[in-house]
Image (cartoon, grey):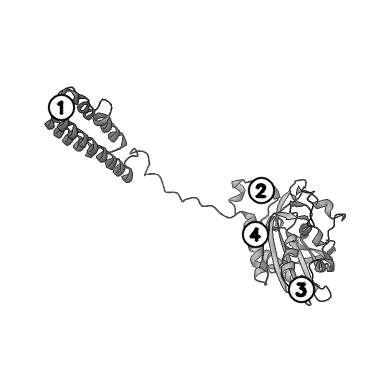
């Protein structure tokens, strides 16, 4: 605006600006208004630039009016922009096709390993077992020594694997990623007098060749019961009940002798699956040396322990042929559960 500014021109400009701003329907219209009135070549900016052509008295009066108008227009601009944003008018009219059919919001779900672990824990909890969890980084003392697996024991050949600090100079030995959740058993027994009934779920790590039935990381649920008078019959009754709750009331179960360092005698338990016996867990009576290690009197107390692989259970229950699917993060697999 090159003409000499007057108070009348400021009043006229205010009326025109506010009327045009009220009719701005979207963000693009608001931006065009801002450029027209308050941009570098805008109409109000032109008034402010021409104040120098006035005499001092006029300059003070008209300059004050122009600056008040600038403040009013800035406030009106902010308010109108906020109204448009709240109303959603900033979106182009064709941004959402309202004729499309509605779709359900996609929801996440529990991992199949988590689902089967919870189902297993529920079965044991209903039989009086308490769930306890521990760290995935474990001390050598609890992962091996307290469980009757000393440094020269052959059983270590399968589990002497992922060490974090093997040379640690301590009575607890080195530090490693746990190869079994059994380490929670001596930890609990050191702090608690019998009776003890616990199940310990969690992830374990072993340096194994990966194939359809083996993974270097897997989950495990370990169980322990210690009390006066517990026998092998109690072990069998507990595991029979577990198998029937998970696989059905008519499931046939078989026990066979097997060796595990921290139980004596040891057994594996298999289920009849489509006409063939499939091993699902190892178990046995707690070795007297393990009881002595935690300060229990093996002449007074007996106990049983067991270890189950949830992925193996899920593979049987749901007909999964490759354990690697559990850790492959393939949504085609995970969304089936």
Front residue of 204 and 42: 42
Front residue of 322 and 286: 286
Real-space CA distance between mark 1 and mark 2, rounded to the nearest whole angstrom: 81 Å
Residue 157, image x and y in percent? 84, 51
Disc 1 or disc 2, which is closer to the eye?
1
Left of 292 or right of it: where is 310? left
Residue 309 got which mark? none
Mark positioned earlier in the residue sequence (2 or 4): 4
Real-space CA distance between mark 2 and mark 3, rounded to the nearest whole angstrom: 35 Å
Residue 272, image x and y in percent? 76, 62
Near mark 1 (Cα within 10 A), the count class, few <14, some 14-19 or many ≥20, is few
Quadrant occupied by the N terminus: top left
Disc 1 or disc 4, which is closer to the eye?
1
Secondary structure of the residue carrying tag 2 is helix
Q: Residue at x 68, y 54 (%)?
A: 319
For disc 2, the marked residue is: 327
For disc 3, the marked residue is: 234
Near mark 3 (Cα within 10 A), the count class, few <14, some 14-19 or many ≥20, is some
Q: Residue at x 19, y 26 (%)?
A: 51
Secondary structure of the residue carrying tag 3 is helix
* Residue 171, placed above or below residue 163: below
Q: Residue furthest front?
A: 56
For disc 1, the marked residue is: 56
Mark positioned earlier in the residue sequence (1 or 4): 1
Q: Are marks 3 and 4 in contact (CB under 8 Å)?
A: no
**Which of the 4 quarters of the picture holds residue 22?**
top left
Disc 3 or disc 1, which is closer to the eye?
1
Q: Is residue 23 visible?
A: no
For disc 4, the marked residue is: 116
Residue 180, image x and y in percent? 75, 57
Secondary structure of the residue carrying tag 1 is helix
């Amino acid at each position: 605006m090159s003409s000499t500014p007057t108070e009348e021109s400021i009043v006229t400009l205010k009326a025109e600006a506010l009327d045009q701003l009220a009719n701005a329907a979207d963000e693009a219209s608001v931006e065009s208004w801002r450029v027209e009135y308050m941009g570098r070549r805008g109409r109000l900016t032109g008034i402010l630039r021409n104040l120098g052509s006035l005499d001092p008295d006029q300059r003070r009066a008209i300059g004050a009016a122009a600056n008040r108008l600038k403040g009013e227009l800035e406030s009106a601009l902010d308010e109108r922009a906020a109204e448009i944003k709240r109303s959603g008018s900033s979106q182009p009219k064709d941004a959402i096709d309202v004729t499309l059919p509605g779709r359900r919001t996609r929801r996440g779900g529990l991992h199949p390993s988590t689902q089967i672990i919870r189902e297993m824990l529920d079965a044991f909890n209903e039989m009086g077992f308490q769930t306890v969890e521990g760290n995935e980084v474990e001390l050598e003392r609890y992962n091996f020594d307290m469980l009757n697996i000393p440094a020269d024991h052959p059983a270590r050949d399968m589990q002497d694997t992922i060490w974090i600090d093997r040379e640690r100079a301590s009575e607890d030995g080195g530090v490693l990623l746990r190869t079994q959740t059994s380490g929670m058993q001596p930890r609990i027994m050191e702090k608690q007098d019998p009776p003890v009934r616990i199940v310990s779920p969690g992830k374990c790590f072993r340096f194994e060749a990966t194939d359809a039935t083996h993974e270097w990381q897997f989950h495990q649920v370990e169980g322990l019961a210690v009390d006066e008078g517990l026998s092998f019959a109690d072990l069998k009754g507990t595991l029979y009940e577990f198998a029937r709750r998970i696989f059905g009331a008519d499931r046939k179960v078989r026990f066979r002798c097997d060796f595990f360092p921290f139980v004596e005698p040891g057994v594996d338990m298999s289920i009849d699956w489509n006409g063939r016996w499939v091993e699902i867990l190892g178990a046995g009576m707690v070795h007297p040396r393990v009881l002595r290690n935690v300060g229990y009197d093996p002449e007074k107390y007996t106990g049983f322990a067991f270890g189950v692989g949830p992925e193996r259970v899920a593979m049987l229950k749901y007909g999964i042929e490759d354990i690697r699917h559990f850790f492959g993060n393939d949504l085609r697999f995970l969304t089936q559960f």
